[in-house]
Image (cartoon, grey):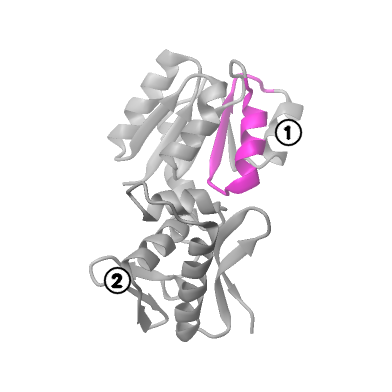
Amino acid sequence: MQKVLIIEDEKKLAAILGKYVTQAGYELQMVHDGAQALAAVESFDPDIILLDLMLPNVDGIVICREVRRNSMVPIIMTTAKVEEIDRLLGLEVGADDYVCKPYSPREVVARVKAILRRVGASTPQSEQLLLDENTLFVTYQNNSVELTQVEFVLLQTLVAHPGRIYNRSRLMDNIYDDDRIVSDRTIDSHIKKIRKKLSQLSPNSEFIHSIYGAGYKYELTDNS
């Protein structure tokens, strides 16, 4: 189930929009204060964000800019401000779409569906990395390779949000559900092994990228 995060301080409006979102089959979380927004993005890991421009404590522009530092998750900005400068500013900091209030909740949900379809269809099926959690096999262009359980969960985390940068601490939390102490080099070692296995699928493709000082991200690139 795809996840929608609504960041909106007007609770009644958020509740109405949230009802349409859940009826459309999405998992929902709502935040009503800008100060809580980034933590919600981190913990909920949404597939798309509906972000109000005018929020208490931290406004939508700041939130959008901060999210874009580490993630390309689609963002639809909503606001009562209709001046062209606000519209341009919202899009310049990385918003994917812009809706002015008052709006139709049906229209907003239609835009959510359109953006998620576009994101999902951006890469042809034959060019996608396919993960089978039942067998721990990864397939690309009809070639398959088997991963260990830890390697599979690590790759699955990265593939879930292409372009999003995950630091080593977040990756360790995802692959180890106990309180064991592991070093950053453990993640680096797993990444090295995954890369070696993925290279068997397509020697000229790069799937996992190192971001200096930040961590790792999944993004399929052709180096031929």
Among the two numbered marks 2 and 1 on one chain, the one whose residue lies closer to the N terminus: 1
Name the residue that disc number 1 marks. 89
Which residue is at 50% across, 32% downward? 39
Q: Residues within 10 Å of mark 2 (few under 14, many from 20)?
A: some
- Check residue 46 for magenta coloring: no
Q: Tell me which residue sits at (40%, 25%) in the image.
A: 17
Where on the picture, by quarter, is residue 204?
Answer: bottom right
Badge 2 amino acid = Leu
Q: Which residue is mark 2?
A: 136
Give 121 or 177, whichever is nearer the viewer: 177
Which residue lies most toward the left here?
134
Q: Secondary structure at mark 1?
A: helix
Check the image and report above or below for 23 versus 146: above
Q: Is residue 60 magenta?
A: yes
Q: Residue furthest right?
A: 85
Q: Secondary structure at mark 2?
A: loop
The magenta segment: 58-82
Query: Residue drawn at (62%, 27%), measured in percent from left and top?
Result: 60
Residue in view at x 43 percent, y 64 percent: 155
Q: Quadrant of residue 61?
A: top right
Q: Quadrant of residue 203?
A: bottom right
Q: Quadrant of the C terminus?
A: bottom right
User: Closer to us: mark 2 or mark 1?
Assistant: 2
Question: Residue 164 placed where, x, y %?
Answer: 55, 53
Mark 2 to mark 1: distance in Å? 44 Å
